[in-house]
């Protein structure tokens, strides 16, 4: 089992681009959360009735 060859597989430019976009897709919402954290209300409604009013 220790004599297995290690085969280097190089990434294409598309794979690098998609990796970068994936990281950006994770970073943007996280940064946005930190930016608006102070503006969030202390209590957040968790249930709404059929009229759209918060009731829970």
Image (cartoon, grey):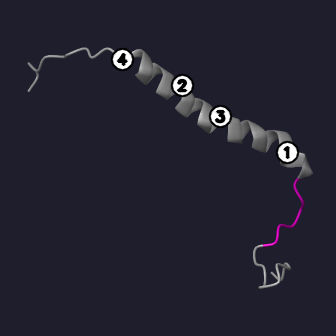
> Magenta segment range?
40-45
> Which residue shows up at 25% across the image and 14% down it?
8
Q: Which residue is mark 4?
A: 11
Depth check, front residue: 15 or 42 = 15
How crowded is the residue under tag 1: few (<14 C-alpha within 10 Å), some, or many (20+)? few
Q: Which residue is mark 1?
A: 36
How far apart, in angstroms, are the residues tagged by discs 1 and 3?
Answer: 14 Å
Classify 18 as above or below 3: below
Asked which secondary structure carries label 3, the reply is helix
Find numbered disc 1 in the image and state the secondary structure of the residue it sits on: helix
- Which image quadrant is residue 20 in? top right
Mark 3: few/some/many CA within 10 Å (<14, 14-19, 20+): few
Q: Main secondary structure of the magenta part?
A: loop
Percent x, y of residue 16: 46, 20
Of the two numbered discs 4 and 1 in the rendering, the one whose residue sits closer to the viewer: 4
Q: Which residue is mark 3?
A: 27
Query: Closer to the N terminus: mark 1 or mark 2?
Result: 2
- The quadrant in which the C terminus is found is bottom right
Instruction: Estimate how packed mark 2 is, as few (under 14), some (14 to 19) or many (20 or more) residues with alpha carbons within 10 Å.
Output: few
Q: What separation in Å lies between label 4 and label 2 (alpha carbons)? A: 13 Å
| Disc on the earlier residue, 4 or 2 | 4
Residue located 83% across and 67% down the image = 44
The disc placed on residue 20 is 2
From what the image shows, is residue 18 above or below residue 7? below
């Amino acid at each position: 089992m220790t004599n297995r060859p290690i085969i280097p597989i190089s990434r294409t430019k598309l794979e690098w681009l998609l990796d970068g976009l994936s990281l950006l897709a994770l970073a943007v919402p996280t940064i946005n959360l930190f930016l608006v954290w102070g503006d969030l209300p202390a209590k957040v409604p968790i249930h709404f009735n059929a009229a759209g009013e918060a009731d829970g």
